[in-house]
Image (cartoon, rainbow, N blue to C red):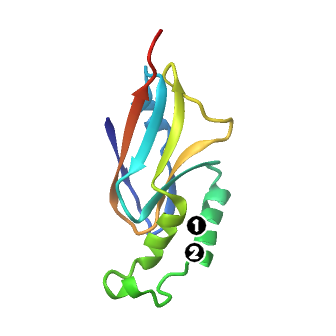
Amino acid sequence: MVVIEVETRKREEVVDITERIREAVRGKSGIAVVYSTHTTTGLIINEAEAGLMEDIIAHLSNLVPYRAGYRHDMIDSNADAHIKASLLGNSVIIPVEDGRLLLGTWQRILFVELDGPRRRKVHVIVYEAEKG
């Protein structure tokens, strides 16, 4: 298992972590499980175009507004981040062949911060295919 640290700078942002995941799977074949251990982050596979990444954050914020009277806000004021993370999910699975992520032309692995800025951890585990 490889642990990747992601440092975010904003409360909500999308960070392309594809190259760091490529490094983690080098020389392996099988399936990679990329997993965030945080309840206010998400992982998705999509295009890493700047406008699209801003659109993703904007639409999540429209869907689940900040401080909209959530009960959890009495504790942390971050209920929106938990709800958004629940909608996205905290893991992605990618096939790996000869150390290469089998992603489509425009697909990237995106870490979605929803309660930053923070220092986060993403775990990468490759379940290797049997040879032969």
Compute the Cα span from label 1 to label 2.
6 Å
| Amino acid type of the residue tagged 1 in the rendering | Ile
Figure quadrant of the N terminus: top left
The residue lying toward the viewer, choosing from 89 and 17, is 89
Give the residue displayed 33% in from the left and 36% down from the top.
Answer: 2
Is 60 displayed left or right of 11 in the figure?
right
Where's residue 38, x and y in %? 36, 59
Where 82 falls versus 71 (above or below)?
A: above
Give the residue displayed 52% in from the left and 27% down from the top.
Answer: 96
Question: Tags 1 and 2 in contact by the CB under 8 Å rule?
Answer: yes
**Furthest residue to the bottom?**
69
Where's residue 40, x and y in %? 41, 65
Where 50 falls versus 61 (above or below)?
A: above
Q: Quadrant of residue 33?
A: top left
Disc 1 is placed on an element classified as: helix
Where's residue 87, x and y in %? 54, 65
Label 2: which residue? 61
Where 126 falls versus 54 (above or below)?
A: above
Q: How many marks?
A: 2
Disc 2 is placed on an element classified as: helix
Q: Residues within 10 Å of mark 2 (few under 14, many from 20)?
A: some
| Amino acid type of the residue tagged 2 in the rendering | Ser
Identify the mark at residue 57; answer none if there is no mark. 1
Q: Residues within 10 Å of mark 1 (few under 14, many from 20)?
A: some
Identify the mark at residue 2; answer none if there is no mark. none
Give the residue displayed 57% in from the left and 75% down from the top.
Answer: 61
Is 9 displayed left or right of 18 in the figure?
left
